[in-house]
Amino acid sequence: MPTEHKLHSLEDSSADLHDTILTQRMENTQPCRVLVVDDDDLVRARLTALLRNAEFEVEAASNGEDALRILGSRHCQILLTDWQMPDMDGLSLCRIVRSEHGESYVYVVMLTVRDSKEDLLKGLGAGADDYVVKSAPVEEIMARLEVARRITHVEYSLRRSHRENRRLAVTDPLTGAYNLRFLMKHLPRELSRSQRYLHPLAVLSCDIDRFKQINDAYGHDIGDEVLRAFVARADSCIREGSDWLARVGGDEFLIVLPETDVAGANRAAQKLRRVFSHCPVATHVGPVKFTVSIGITALEAEREIQEPSKIEDLLRAVDRGLYASKSQGGDKATAASVTAGRVAIIKQPGEKNGIN
Amino acid sequence: MGSIRRRPLTPAFRKAPATQDDSFESLRQAFHARLESERVHFVTLSAALARADENPVWIFEDLVYRAHRLQGGAAIFEESEVAKAAGRLESAAGAAAQSRADNTDEDVWSALEDLVKLMGNIESVRAVANA
């Protein structure tokens, strides 16, 4: 799953899922859809014909309850409803739509024979956006529906740009990975969740070895291609939906692996290291080979009970591991931990330092 | 200087006026067919009202329901006189029901007779036109 798509599953999954569905629906629903609600079948048929003639998509219902069923299954941008109907009248329908369908805005036009000022105020008070009497000329009714179409289009554009802005605010524009802002918001959440439920949590810090030389030798365009390739490959090495990757500096990335202990983090790091050392990256000037150094740290449940780690501890430990990997010439993964405020490299059996 | 191109008209105004489409005529015919049966209902209700000795509230309520429905349909099918007459009957019957009036309520009778007469006229005109 591309990193930009992971944003939605992590940040506010239900709202974003709704947004995504809404976007797909709206992108696929041209012209915009109107739900006509009237208990008179001839009036429904007449309005349906008028609307289709004006290139609206039309759904129809004979009462409020049917209308709610349709709204529950399909997004309708405009609701054109009568007031007096059996079972559930237009006012009640309007109130329910306003209270239950807040996320995807439904523009409500009340079309009724009630023409007093009091009725108009009641209709608008119930949440209708517009109020038209049935005796109005057809041209006026259609003109008001054109207004509704314009407004729902503006609303959709705003929603889309808001979603895009929200994505850009937490995304690195070059690579599509999460940015530092996202990391600083979500890593503490991962840490506290892990500590609350005593679940493991691992963090990898990755740095492209001799990245400056790549830039110097091939130019910054190729350097950028390498960074993008790093994110794409790293993304394919981590678990979809739970693990995530953030760019924290020029060629530095942090990978967060929830529900992963140090052994699992080691395996992930080795996989990541190999995927770069074995396969050069294709760029527009040809293949570029590079390696990555990795620092690893993981929370240990037993120790977290006695002495909960802080976010700074995690970052210090992972930095220390990365530094150790770099100081051994790169293309290595080294685990480190913080105990009683002191960072220590975790030595593996048969290894002097680091894990390869 | 480049030519000034007109923006395309919005869909609602792109085509011929909506009132002239084919579906309107067929739906209007269906509405008029219903008008005939509705007139029969109103005549039946007026007979029931005339016979009702006491508590004709249910008749007033039925009149309100039917007049309201007729008003909406007539407005949409551009029978504005029928819509107005039905609106008057709805108001009169609604007020009579609320005040628990008896079966001699003048406003109700006047509105009912006007409406039935108007519907009969429309029926006659259409019958002549179709002959």
Image (spheres, rainbow, N blue to C red):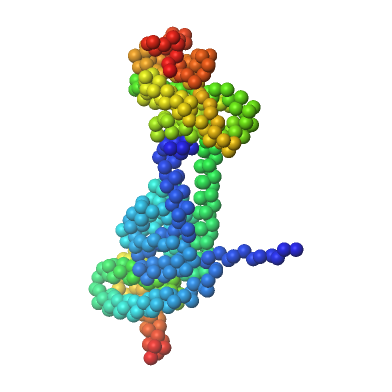
> From what the image shows, is residue B121 above or below residue A144?
below
For image coordinates 36% across by 52% down, the residue present is A73
For image coordinates 29% across by 67% down, the residue present is B57
Q: Tell me the quadrant of the picture where the C terminus of chain A can be found.
A: top left
Corner quadrant of residue A70 = bottom left
The location of residue A266, given as percent across then percent down, is 40, 20
> Can you see residue B6?
yes
> From what the image shows, is residue A124 above or below residue B67?
above
For image coordinates 40% across by 40% down, the residue present is A14
Q: How many marks?
A: 0
The location of residue A336, given as percent across then percent down, is 44, 14
Q: Pick whichever, A354 or B11, lies toward us.
A: A354
The location of residue A168, given as percent across then percent down, is 54, 37
Q: Tell me the quadrant of the picture where the N terminus of chain A can be found.
A: top left
Corner quadrant of residue A285 = top right
Q: Pick whichever, A305 or A205, lies toward us.
A: A205
Q: Pick whichever, A85 or A255, lies toward us.
A: A255
The location of residue B35, given as percent across then percent down, is 36, 78
Q: Pick whichever, B54 or A90, lies toward us.
A: A90
Q: Judge left or right: residue B119 versus residue B47.
A: right
For image coordinates 54% across by 52% down, the residue present is A154
Q: Judge left or right: residue A58 versus residue A169.
A: left
